């Protein structure tokens, strides 16, 4: 039986110890953020958490118990890539948690335990700008001093993101998950604005067109198109090859054929037809010839206004701004090509081209499909109008808001919106978005039209599945019945 004359562990003594501990934590500790986990969805049988949310963060002082750096295995390199396994041990005041955190969280929905820190909650550690997950809460160390425990010791591991929703309103915390996880990219339409440009005219000796004699085979990427140099004082032509994988025999992505060449610069000053060669691209066998025009061709088209709202490459024509030249115009071709129009003619030919549109819906450059003939000193290119309508977009999507496709009903969370490139990076996608459908932001009220859905993760630098597959295909051809030997 205890001696009744010695009072060991009175409330006043316990309060004194707790106050001293609180003071030490505030003097020598670090202000972290405690983020309670909300269990939004769980499987009813095994009670596995399949959807969690962190939308509250509470500043709290904590003592860092690691004095030589992070614990754990550190950064390791395995066959699955680079993995960081840092650990962190923090000590927090029991009284501070119970009088500060608990009253703020006990009435929140989907909080299963608010009376103490719980495993699965997160800690934002500002010194390393990192998120840690609580793996174990030690509540009996030191062991019952004056018959009471005064601190919680939190055993934490570096947080491994798995599509949890983190939206605390604290920017330094929320941006931790902005570029991690599986991310899809939506290319949006943008405001419809017709592109404009200006032309450069060659008075004589420009390449009017390039004619394909043999499409070749085996091209995986467009080869470089080279032209023989123009005479002194002239301008050498430049072009871009267009591939197609739709022809018979094009069974794989590396069996493309060259179907046409467009001119980024038709050159000037040629007196004989320049030789056309194809360099690179992984294929072979392509042959082409060129024809030059001796009377006023469009050498190149410069972009004045790239426009916006385009969903595909835009057609361009160059009408005659003044009276066309009706003098005798000569177009010459390779003498081996007898099927094309050769010799002399009187008249003019309207130049045509294609404006190449990027994912942002703007025209980045123009190539000529026909440099035309008979132009004088001035001309103005006419760009096809975009199919978009200026009222198709409104507002600006904000980070972490939910967007919903109006046709598919698909929902997703916004990671990043780029109004310049007209791209929307999203995650936690609940279905499949459909190109052409409208999406609406549920918080900002913004809406836009989807041009293209890119499901491959192009944001996270560690998503190398496509690269691994391409390299593996060079070793094993799984299109064969037995890639390891004879069938």
Image (spheres, rainbow, N blue to C red):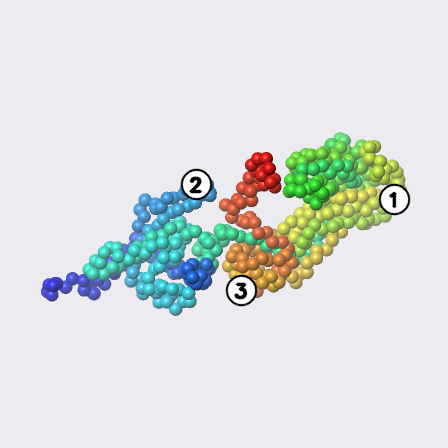
188 sits left or right of 136 in the view? right
Q: Name the residue under label 3.
A: 443
Furthest residue in direction bottom, as rendered: 107
x then y, percent, for residue 412: 54, 59
Query: Mark 1 to mark 3: distance in Å?
Result: 61 Å
Q: Residues within 10 Å of mark 1 (few under 14, many from 20)?
A: some
Vertical arrangement, residue 258 with respect to residue 135, above or below: above
Q: Is residue 346 above or below residue 410?
A: above
Look at the numbered disc 2 and give the secondary structure of its residue.
strand
Asked which secondary structure carries label 1, the reply is loop
Query: Which residue is depicted at the point 32% across and 44% down?
Result: 68
Coordinates of residue 341 in the picture (x, y in percent): 85, 39
Q: Is residue 78 left or right of residue 278?
A: left
Indicate the quadrant containing the N terminus: top left, top right, bottom left or bottom right: bottom left
| CA gap, disc 3 and disc 2 | 41 Å
Any part of residue 306 in sight: no
Q: Earlier in the sequence, mark 1 or mark 2?
A: 2
The residue drawn where x is 84% and y is 43% is 374
Question: Closer to the camera: disc 1 or disc 3?
Answer: 3
Q: Residue tagged by mark 2?
A: 77
Q: In the rendering, which numbered label is found on residue 347?
A: 1
Name the residue: 76% across, 41% down: 299
Which residue is painted at 64% across and 40% down in the image? Answer: 254
For the residue carrying disc 2, how many other residues have a C-alpha within 10 Å: few (<14), some (14-19), or many (20+)? few
**Left or right relative to 1: residue 254:** right
Q: Where is residue 277 in the image (x, y as percent from the top left)?
A: 72, 33
Query: Callout 3 environment at 10 Å: few (<14), some (14 to 19), or many (20+)?
Result: few
């Amino acid at each position: 039986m205890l001696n009744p004359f010695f009072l060991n562990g009175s409330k006043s003594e316990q309060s004194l110890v707790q106050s001293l501990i609180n003071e030490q934590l505030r003097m020598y500790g670090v202000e972290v953020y405690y983020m309670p986990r909300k269990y939004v969805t769980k499987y009813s049988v095994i009670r596995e958490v399949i959807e969690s949310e962190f939308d509250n963060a509470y500043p709290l002082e904590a003592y860092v118990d690691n004095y030589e750096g992070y614990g754990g295995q550190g950064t390791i390199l395995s066959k699955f890539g680079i993995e960081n396994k840092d650990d962190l041990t923090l000590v927090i005041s029991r009284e501070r948690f119970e009088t500060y955190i608990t009253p703020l969280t006990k009435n929140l929905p989907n909080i299963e335990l608010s009376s103490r820190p719980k495993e699965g909650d997160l800690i934002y550690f500002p010194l390393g700008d990192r998120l840690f997950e609580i793996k174990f809460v030690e509540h009996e160390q030191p062991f019952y001093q004056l018959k009471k425990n005064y601190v919680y010791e939190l055993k934490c591991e570096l947080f491994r993101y798995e599509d949890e929703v983190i939206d605390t309103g604290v920017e330094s915390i929320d941006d931790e998950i902005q570029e991690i996880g599986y991310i899809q990219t939506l290319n949006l339409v943008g405001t419809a604005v017709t592109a404009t440009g200006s032309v450069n005219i060659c008075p004589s000796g420009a390449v009017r067109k390039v004619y394909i004699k043999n499409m070749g085979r085996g091209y995986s990427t467009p080869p470089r198109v080279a032209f023989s140099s123009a005479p002194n004082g002239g301008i050498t032509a430049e072009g871009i090859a267009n591939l197609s994988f739709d022809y018979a025999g094009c069974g794989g992505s590396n069996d493309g054929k060259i179907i046409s060449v467009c001119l980024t610069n038709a050159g000037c000053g040629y007196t004989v037809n320049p030789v056309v060669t194809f360099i690179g691209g992984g294929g072979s066998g392509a042959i082409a010839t060129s024809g030059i025009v001796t009377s006023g061709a469009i050498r190149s088209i410069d972009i004045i206004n790239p426009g916006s709202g385009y969903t595909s490459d835009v057609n361009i024509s160059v009408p005659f701004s003044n009276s066309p030249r009706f003098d005798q115009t000569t177009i010459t071709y390779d003498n081996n090509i007898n099927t094309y129009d050769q010799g002399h003619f009187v008249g003019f030919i309207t130049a045509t081209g294609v404006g190449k549109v990027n994912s942002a819906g703007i025209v980045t450059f123009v190539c000529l499909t026909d440099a035309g003939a008979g132009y004088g000193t001035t001309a103005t290119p006419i760009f096809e109008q975009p199919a978009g309508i200026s009222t198709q977009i409104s507002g600006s999507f904000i980070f972490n808001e939910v967007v919903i496709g109006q046709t598919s009903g698909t929902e997703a969370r916004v990671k990043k919106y780029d109004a310049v490139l007209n791209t929307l990076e999203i995650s936690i996608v609940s279905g499949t978005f459909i190109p052409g459908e409208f999406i609406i932001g549920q918080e900002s009220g913004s809406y836009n039209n989807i041009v293209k859905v890119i499901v491959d993760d192009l944001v996270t630098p560690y998503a190398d599945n496509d690269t691994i597959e391409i390299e593996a295909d060079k070793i094993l051809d799984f299109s064969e019945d037995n890639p390891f030997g004879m069938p």
